[in-house]
């Protein structure tokens, strides 16, 4: 249920450079074929089980599914397989809140104390603070005890007690800190104002309006209804993950959907079918990295709005590029690969940017300490605002970008090193491709950057 966060030394999608000023309006056949190969390689090597969809102006231009939604029964995922989408739920919840504000039933200044005075600082916390994670309310999913009850049904009263028992982290409005507690409370506020369940409000205000066929408030996973279990890759096989009871994430992470439905939802939100232009502008107003249920994703010089989600073994993301009417959604129920690299590959295929199909045939090798020591040093490039320090840590080679934590490098040859968790490849060659102790090419997410020793 925690918000999906990228783990690349702050490069994320923005690392990719767009090399053309004319962009495709539908994914080209050759690019779609290469993208198919990309996902087929991931599936063959047990790197991911997922479903993706890409739409332009509300029309699907690419879809792909790989892996199983039920491994034990060998059931393949299809375009209607439903996934838990975690914190993408927050966009749905924020949309309903903005609708209620337009109807005069709430305001951004409405105080939390009007509904739940037992929460610390409730008299100083507003709906706007909750929407933007600026309330200071502790994130209950960060508590160690969370894992002792996450799979068990909890009543509204029990969840309110859990949230209200925590001390406040900071004065409301003073800063940003992501907290699922905020959106659980917003879900309960929606229920009190509409005098219906959050599930009913979701159906009435979004699902039926847009004709979403596979989106709902989640319950216990039912694979007979084409709902995916989630998995973690352990000891060479996919192992079923625990299943959070959806009474706990509520409006912070209980929606179940498909990539196709998510693209329809994002297009509907940004085309005025759900909220007014003023409300959408308010949702898009980013402060300290977060708007109202929306964050931003860069791709080259372009910017998308959306949200990521993670719950149990599910990882998902949806993004919308307003200037191009482009919506992207990816939902995974098993991941053994860097999710961000998949998002980059999809967008690269659409925008005609080169991207690489990963090669998992190479096997790690052990280099001598003397050979690795020759690569130690501080390296710089003119294309990125950071240096990278390469050094030995015992018998292992590490790399560290400016202001970031060090990460381990695995050698695949005397010149090629990888950090697979972030999709990073470093090849020690010069600008002509010849082996070099003084230069390396950093490859990540379709981008290539030549670093030279300082």
Image (spheres, rainbow, N blue to C red):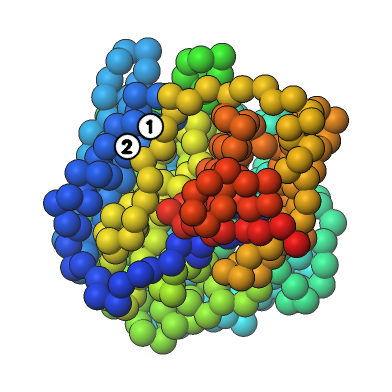
| Of 342 and 173, the residue lying toward us | 342
* Within-10-Å neighbours for mark 2: few <14, some 14–19, many 20+: many
Helix or strand or loop: what does disc 1 sit on? helix
Q: Is residue 438 above or below residue 104?
A: above
* Within-10-Å neighbours for mark 1: few <14, some 14–19, many 20+: many
Give the residue at mark 1: 42
Q: Is residue 327 above or below residue 280?
A: above
Q: Residue at x 23, y 59 (%)?
A: 55
Residue 250 location (% of width, % of height): 52, 48
Mark number displayed over residue 320:
none
Q: Is 440 on the left or on the right of 41, as rendered?
A: right
Give the residue at mark 2: 39
Residue 220 location (% of width, % of height): 43, 30
Residue extending farthest bottom? 278
Can residue 118 be seen at all in this image of the molecule? no
Q: Residue at x 34, y 31 (%)?
A: 41
For the residues labelled 2 and 1, say whether their Cβ atoms are less than 8 Å apart. yes
Image quarter of the C terminus: bottom right
Q: Residue at x 82, y 61 (%)?
A: 169
Image quarter of the N terminus: top right
| Of 210 and 194, the residue lying toward us | 210
| Of 208 and 37, the residue lying toward us | 37
Callout count: 2
Can residue 332 be seen at all in this image of the molecule? yes
Q: Is 316 on the left or on the right of 211, as rendered?
A: right
Helix or strand or loop: what does disc 2 sit on? helix
Residue 122 location (% of width, % of height): 74, 69
Residue 231 location (% of width, % of height): 48, 26
Q: CA distance from mark 2 to mark 1?
A: 5 Å
């Amino acid at each position: 249920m925690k918000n999906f966060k990228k783990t690349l030394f702050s490069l994320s999608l923005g690392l990719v450079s767009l090399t053309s000023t004319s962009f495709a309006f539908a994914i080209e056949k050759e690019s779609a074929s290469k993208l198919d190969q990309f996902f087929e390689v991931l599936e063959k090597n047990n790197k991911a089980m997922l479903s993706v969809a890409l739409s332009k102006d509300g029309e699907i231009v690419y879809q792909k599914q790989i892996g199983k939604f039920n491994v034990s029964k060998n059931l393949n995922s299809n375009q209607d397989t439903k996934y838990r989408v975690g914190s993408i739920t927050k966009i749905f919840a924020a949309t309903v809140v903005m609708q209620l504000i337009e109807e005069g039933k709430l305001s951004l200044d409405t105080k939390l104390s009007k509904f739940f005075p037992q929460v610390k600082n409730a008299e100083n916390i507003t709906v706007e603070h909750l929407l933007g994670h600026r309330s200071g309310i502790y994130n209950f999913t960060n508590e160690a005890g969370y894992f002792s009850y996450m799979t068990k049904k909890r009543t509204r009263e029990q969840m309110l007690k859990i949230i209200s028992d925590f001390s406040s982290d900071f004065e409301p409005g003073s800063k940003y800190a992501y907290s699922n507690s905020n959106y659980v409370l917003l879900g309960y506020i929606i229920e009190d104002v509409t005098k219906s369940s959050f599930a009913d409000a979701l159906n009435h205000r979004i699902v039926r309006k847009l004709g979403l066929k596979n989106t709902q408030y989640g319950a216990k996973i039912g694979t007979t209804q084409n709902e995916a279990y989630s998995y973690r890759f352990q000891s060479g096989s996919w192992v079923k993950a625990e299943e959070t009871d959806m009474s706990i994430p509520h409006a912070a992470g209980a929606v179940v959907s498909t990539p196709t439905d998510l693209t329809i939802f994002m297009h509907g939100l940004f085309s005025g079918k759900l909220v007014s232009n003023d409300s959408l502008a308010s949702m898009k107003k980013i402060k300290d990295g977060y708007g109202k249920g929306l964050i931003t994703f860069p791709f080259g010089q372009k910017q998308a709005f959306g949200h990521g989600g993670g719950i149990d073994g599910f990882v998902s993301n949806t993004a919308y590029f307003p200037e191009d009417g482009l919506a992207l959604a990816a939902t995974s129920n098993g991941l053994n690969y860097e999710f961000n690299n998949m998002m980059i590959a999809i967008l690269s295929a659409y925008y005609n940017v080169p991207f690489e199909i990963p090669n998992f045939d190479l096997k790690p090798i052990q280099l001598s300490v003397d050979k690795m020591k020759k690569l130690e040093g501080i390296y710089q490039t003119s294309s990125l605002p950071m240096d990278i320090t390469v050094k030995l840590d015992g018998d292992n080679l590490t790399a560290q970008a400016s202001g970031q934590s060090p990460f381990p490098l695995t050698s695949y040859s005397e010149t090629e090193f990888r950090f697979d968790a972030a999709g990073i490849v470093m090849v020690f060659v010069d600008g002509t491709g010849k082996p070099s102790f003084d230069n390396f090419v950093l490859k990540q997410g379709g981008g290539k950057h030549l670093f030279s020793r300082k």
